[in-house]
Amino acid sequence: NGGGGTADKGSAADLLGGVLILGQRQITYHSTAESDNTRVLPTGDSMILSCDMLSGGIAGSASQLRDGNDASVAARYLLGDDAGRVHLLSVLRSPPAGDVSGLHLETLGYASLSSTINHLGNGLVYVGSQFG
């Protein structure tokens, strides 16, 4: 959990039914179980440095969150990038089959460049940095 740009892959694969790849310049979801379902989200100039998979945490449970297309949020991750930004990545599922339908990235704010990022619960986030 949370260091050097890697996520807890075991729980992510169980939850999503595929692989979530946090590359330095893009985020990709891929599943061969869902008829070769692939979703790509470019991150532009942001290089992802750290991540943490959320369980329940920010703004309610995944089943309570919806986007404009009535897709439920299957999983959420906190991400830290090379500009000190903290992002929330949401993996969206479309009803009724529950296939992953998209990826949504929202910038939450700024912190030090993060070597590690961890959601502590109760609205608290730990940002570890080698740069102070």
Image (tube, rainbow, N blue to C red):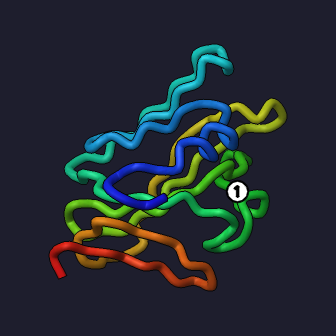
Indicate the position of residue 62 as horizontal and vertical percent values. Answer: 72, 59
Q: Which residue is mark 1?
A: 66
With respect to residue 90, does 115 lie above or below? below
State the image quarter where residue 27 is shown.
Answer: top left
In the image, taking residue 65 as reference, residue 43 lies left or right, namely: left
In what element is the residue under mark 1? loop
Q: Is residue 19 left or right of residue 44?
A: right
Q: Callout 1: few (<14), some (14-19), or many (20+) C-alpha neighbours within 10 Å? A: few
In the drawing, does residue 16 fall left or right of residue 105? right
Going by the numbered disc 1, the residue's amino acid type is: Arg
State the count of labels: 1
Q: Residue at x 15, y 76 (%)?
A: 131
Residue 96 point in image, percent of width and height: 84, 34
Residue that appears at 60% across and 44% down: 12
**Residue positioned 59% across, 63% down in the render:** 54
Determine the residue positioned at 33% across, 40% down: 23
Front-lying residue, 31 or 8? 8
Residue 51 % position (x, y) = 42, 58
